[in-house]
Image (cartoon, rainbow, N blue to C red):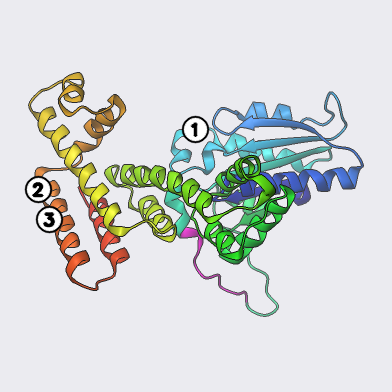
Amino acid sequence: MQERIHYIKSEDYCQINMEYKAILEKLNEVYGYPPEIVVLDGEAASPADIAYSLEAGGLFASLRLVWWKNPLLLRSGGRKKVADEAEYLEMLDVLGQPGESILVVSNYIEEEKKSARRPAKKKAAPGKEPGPKRGKGLEAWLENNAVVHNLLPLSPGEMEKWIVQEMKFRQLTANPEEIGRLARSGQDMYYLLTLLDKLSILVPGGIIGKELLDEELEIKQESSIFRMLDSMSEQKPVPALHMLNGLLEQGQVPLVILSMMARELKIMSKVKALQEAKRSADDIQIALKQAPFIVKKHIKNARNFSWQDIDQLFARMLETDVAFKSTAKNERLLLENIIMAYGRRK
């Protein structure tokens, strides 16, 4: 059964797609022709949908590949929303019977789960193989019955090699320093592919210079800062810490990040005050001269912060500002402490 079921999991959609394409190429090599492909949405596909899709004998080929993307059962809290998990598992057991269907299940690891994927692995005792994964859910079933493709994030060195390969394909070149900057930028692989595609059109002669790369990464940094601030206001410290690390690796100035944190908290406190004064969302938008989506976001998040919480966060930011300017304390650690303070709010 195992070679007919593949389970791909990664923190990067690009890695998932590349591994999926590698499976397709292998099937083409083994069978001599490409399979018919059926793609199923992980949230909408029912057991009956998947069972029907896996029936042997496609309309246009004798080999069929079914790609089940991001099943709800593999997401955080997803099992609580699915009443018929047993039906999914019964359906998957059908794959043990003879047939010409291949199932690929992909799982994009959510931001909150990423830090839990890097514990040191315990080696099995000599002569002993690791035992089956315990559990009754879909995750345990796949771990025990499928070919598991557990794709960990590329190291900086691996990322540099991948970037060089993609640049060569697009007839681009850059010096080692700029390649290193791209590899350590903290951006996902899809963004880097899109950036290389863009640069292959913009750059005459195919040589990527420092100035152009500065400009492109600066645009992405600004976007990442706002995503980090959103995660902080939503009390999600883990993704915010990941984004902070990426921003600092890209060379963003800690004092600029701190000023953006203070600005965001100031807007939220004003929204909270106007909300408590029974002002409507439209009134708040006009009073603060902010876009509707910004006001809507802060109305939602401000309810989770008391005035005491806000005072304490402002005080911590003031202490951090003084420390930046008068001490040699670790700036990254000081910013991380602010993010963790958001996460500890009740």
10 Å neighbourhood of mark 3: few (<14), some, or many (≥20)?
few
Mark 2 residue type = Gln
Quadrant of the rendered structure where residue 318 is? bottom left
Mark 3 or mark 1: name the one nearer the start of the chain.
1
Q: Rounded to the nearest whole Å, what is the CA distance between mark 2 and mark 3?
A: 11 Å
Q: Nearer the viewer, mark 3 or mark 1?
A: 3
Q: Position of residue 193 (x, y in %)?
A: 62, 45
Disc 3 element? helix
Mark 1 residue type = Ala
Q: Which residue is identified by label 2? A: 308
Residue 170 colored in magenta in the image: no
Q: Which of marks 2 and 3 is in front?
A: 3
Q: Which residue is identified by label 1? A: 83
Residue drawn at (90%, 43%) of the image: 31
Left or right: residue 23 compared with residue 39: right
Q: Position of residue 102 (x, y in %)?
A: 77, 40
Choose between 179 and 106: the one closer to the eye.
179
The residue stretch that appears in magenta: 116-124
Q: Residue 269 carries which label?
A: none
Choose between 209 and 143: the one closer to the eye.
209
Q: In this orientation, does residue 187 appear?
A: no
